[in-house]
Image (spheres, rainbow, N blue to C red):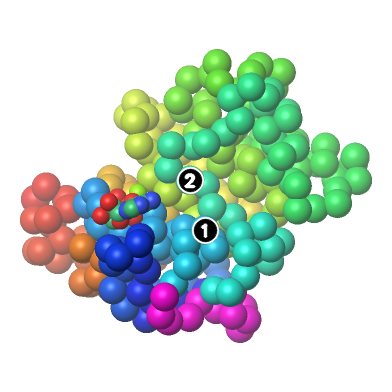
Amino acid sequence: MLKVNNIDVYYDKVQALFGVSIEVHQNEVISIIGSNGAGKSTLMKTIMGLNNAKKGTIEFEGERIDTVKAHSIVGKGIVYVPEGREIFPDMSVIENLEMGAFSKNYTKEQMNQKMQEAYDLFPRLYERRNQLAGTMSGGEQQMLAISRGLMSDPKLIMFDEPSLGLAPVLVDEMFEAIVRINKEKKKTVIIVEQNAFMAISISDRCYVLRNGLVTMEGESKELLGNDEVNKSYLGG
Ligand SMILES: Nc1ncnc2c1ncn2[C@@H]1O[C@H](COP(=O)(O)OP(=O)(O)O)[C@@H](O)[C@H]1O
Ligand SMILES: [Mg+2]
């Protein structure tokens, strides 16, 4: 479904990704783990068209997307739920959700149905639907960011550190929601995390990024038993 092939990405003269390749199949959950500064967000943003690859290609459903602008990439069925949420703080929950559907020409009925799906996934959002997003807790804002991403009915959804800064009970809720998004809503998922154990646990396959390089890849259950992964990322 998605093929990132040997990309190099730079910020000015500083190289952030070195020949990175990843492949994602339909309905998979892929985790990308790595410490702070490894290049995880850079990779997501490059897939999304927010950074340019100087070398290499990115294909989505057989079509090159590395030359396509970010807003048209949303139209092709990829969304990115960024690190730090980036919801619109001065808009209500409902207005934020509507913004997530900008690439679609939904009828009022379709819009209502997508909203209902968001409320089914996170009932808390329904209770707070008229509240300004900026006044909600971090966990609620994360729920909103995820739901906003789903409003355009993407085929592939990328989560950048969804558990960052959340209380443990909310971390579990967030990972459960991501599993439901994959299993019930049939979305292909890429999840980027420093919380490696959780991310590996819910994913089919995993890539390890280190200093802008893919240093390891494989079936998640195999990586969970790998000594180096254990030592570097799982505190084992
Ligand atoms: N906008 C930017 N300008 C310059 N350097 C950046 C920018 N964003 C990220 N970097 C650098 O690129 C590298 C990878 O960063 P990032 O992709 O954010 O890592 P991660 O998400 O894994 O923590 C880091 O060295 C970081 O300092
Ligand atoms: Mg990051």
The disc, 2 or 1, on the residue closer to the chain's N-terminal end is: 1
The magenta stretch spans which residues?
54-65
Which residue is at a point 55% across and 56% down the rendered structure image? 157
| Cα–Cα span, label 2 and label 1 | 11 Å
Residue 16 picture quarter: bottom left
Residue 142 in view: yes
Compared to residue 151, the image places residue 206 above or below, namely below
* Residue at the spot 35% in from the left edge and 60% down from the top edge: 11
Q: Which residue is mark 2?
A: 82
- Which disc is residue 23 wearing? none
Q: Secondary structure at mark 1?
A: loop
> Which residue is located at x 8 percent, y 56 percent?
231
Q: Position of residue 144 (x, y in %)?
A: 58, 33
Q: Nearer the viewer, residue 171 or 48?
A: 48
The 10 Å Cα crowd at callout 2, few under 14, some 14 to 19, many 20 or more, is many
Residue type (three-letter) at the residue carrying disc 1: Leu
Q: Is residue 63 magenta?
A: yes
Please say whether residue 3 is visible from this viewpoint. no
Q: Residue at x 54, y 74 (%)?
A: 66
Q: Within 10 Å of the Cα at label 1, are there few (<14), some (14-19), or many (20+) other Cα atoms? A: some
Q: Which mark is residue 50?
A: 1
